[in-house]
Image (spheres, rainbow, N blue to C red):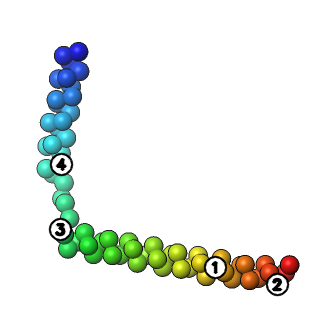
Amino acid sequence: MATYFRKLQRFLHDLRVELKKVNWPTRRELSVFTGIVIVVILAIGAFFWVLDTGFTAALKLVI
């Protein structure tokens, strides 16, 4: 049981060391990247909405 806690302690120590090495984005970078993701998601959603509407209209003409 003691080795389990020792392994856990070592893991948490290594985790802390590795997280210090991470290059975290600044607040500005985070907001820019978030904005880009939202715009791309909306653009793709609009594209598929137009595609779906067109296919639905074409299907109604066939039926």
Instruction: Pinpoint residue 5: horizontal percent, then vertical percent.
Output: 19, 23
- In the picture, residue 31 is in which quadrant? bottom left
The answer to whether marks 1 and 3 mark residues whose Cβ atoms lie closer than 8 Å is no
- Look at the image and tell me in which quarter the C terminus lies: bottom right
The residue at the point 84 percent across, 81 percent down is 62
For this rendering, which residue is in front, 14 or 47? 47
Dot 3 or dot 4: first in sequence order is 4
The residue at the point 14 percent across, 36 percent down is 13
Dot 2 or dot 4: first in sequence order is 4
Dot 1 or dot 2: first in sequence order is 1
Q: Does residue 6 appear to the left or right of 42 in the view shown?
A: left
**Callout 4 secondary element:** helix
- Amino acid of disc 2: Leu
Q: Does residue 45 appear to the left or right of 32 in the view shown?
A: right
- Amino acid of disc 1: Leu
Kindly identify which numbered label has been placed on residue 19: 4
Q: Gap between marks 2 and 3, in whole Å? A: 53 Å
Q: Gap between marks 2 and 4, in whole Å? A: 58 Å
Above or below, comparing residue 25 to residue 46 in the picture: above
Instruction: Pinpoint residue 52: horizontal percent, then vertical percent.
Output: 65, 77
Residue at label 2? 61
Q: Residue furthest top?
A: 1
- Amino acid of disc 3: Thr
Q: Nearer the viewer, mark 1 or mark 4?
A: 1
**Callout 2 secondary element:** helix
**Callout 1 secondary element:** helix
Residue at label 1? 51
Dot 1 or dot 4: first in sequence order is 4
Dot 2 or dot 3: first in sequence order is 3
Q: Does residue 3 appear to the left or right of 39 in the view shown?
A: left
Few, some or many residues within 10 Å of mark 4 (<14, 14–19, 20+): few
Kindly identify which numbered label has been placed on residue 26: 3
